[in-house]
Amino acid sequence: MPADVRTLEEHRDAILAAVRAAEPVSLRLADCLGLVLCEDVTSLVDLPGFDNSAMDGYAVRAVDVSAADPDVPGTAVRLPVVGEVAAGGVATRAVGPGEAVRIMTGAMIPDGADAIVKVEDTDGGTGTVEIRAGAPVGTSVRPAGEDVQHGQVVLTSGTTIDARGVALLAATGHPDALVRPRPRVAIVSAGAELVPPGEPLQPGQIHESNSYMLEAAVVASGAVAVRQATLDDDPAAVLSAVAALADDVDAIVTSGGVSMGAYDVVKESLRDHGVDFVQVAMQPGKPQGFGLVGDRNVPLFALPGNPVSSYVSFEVFVRPALRRMMGRDPEQRRTLTARLEHPLSSPPGRAQVARAVATHTEEGWRADPVWGQASHFVADLARANAFVLIPAEATRVEAGDMVDMWLLDEPGAG
């Protein structure tokens, strides 16, 4: 391989070696979903915090109802109801011998009671209650600290906080958590031919789509898309925009202007300002740029302008880097094995990332390559839900061959 050409893996590894995880910040729980915890968290309370009822029913002394048997006529026990306690309330008196207190689910167990008779085993009385089934000691009682004890570690550093983790943090008394924040990513599209969607097109113009696609990809990766700009083929404007953005965001993603043409403005304006432009032995997405810009060494990813090339480049290079910045495992999407439905040719010496429609059958995964593998076929890109990975040493794979595949729409993959 020529010295000025990198393999896909070499370029990805160079990027990952340059980016760093963000410094931890304390965020409110509502903003922590999907973020990585940066310290062990201990419970501030017992959970439950007090003995409470698992049922709507009656708090009793087990010995007072032990004779009640629904299968034996005449064994029901009638007790006076001396009080009532709802969730959030406190019983005004203890349960004495031969007494009952009406109780709701989650309510504190009154002193003196050691069992709960569920309402279905009674006549539901309010002045007196007929107990038709006994309840041994501890029946339907949730003891204090049964789930979590005060001071117990409930989540460890490095945990990615999901909805269940949010619930646990809240239940154990924590209104916020120390996490690595989401990178704030600016997106810049370059090209004089680009016109916003909805505006009329003049000859030679196209509707700008890459920034919308990349913004959605940034959000799906767990980061935040904060700025979006479309620039003409003016090197000074590109350099000025990048300099301003580097003071304000955590990463910059550009699309277009990175190839070998006379008007490849991103390459022309940034190659002497910290960004390396290289050729990567892959299809699509051969021209790539990456560097650290500005006083804050903000990562800048310069991607090709063709929509498919841009999206593939994001998946292969940008998404892993954003995950590393969030303190997450930067690995690619989970690699599956699939049986190819139709043959695919691949250029010699270049890894191919082919778009396909993946389906799961009783025999396993199957991958049907989309018809349009060219880098400008947006409709086929939208139809695909998987990438088939053809190694650089292969020039053709046949129908029926087993191939590696990334499932793009896998639940939870972001």
Image (cartoon, rainbow, N blue to C red):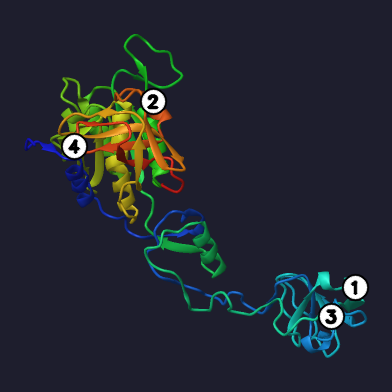
Circles 1, 3 touching at the beta carbon (< 8 Å): no
Rendered view: 400 above or below 115: above
Q: Which mark is residue 125?
A: 1
Residue 392 is tagged as 4
- Residue on which the image places disc 2: 380
Total numbered badges shown on the rendered structure? 4
Nearest-to-viewer mark from 2 and 1: 2
Q: Is residue 161 left or right of residue 58?
A: left
**Closer to the camera: disc 1 or disc 3?**
3
- Badge 1 marks a residue whose secondary structure is loop
Q: Nearer the viewer, mark 4 or mark 1?
A: 4
SS for callout 3 = loop
The residue lying at 48 percent from left, 77 percent from top is 152
Q: Amino acid at mark 4?
A: Ala
What kind of element bears circle 2? helix
Residue 298: image x %, image y %? Answer: 25, 46
Instruction: Count neighbours of disc 3 (C-alpha within 10 A) and say few if under 14, some if 14 to 19, many if 20 or more.
Output: some
Q: Amino acid at mark 3?
A: Asp
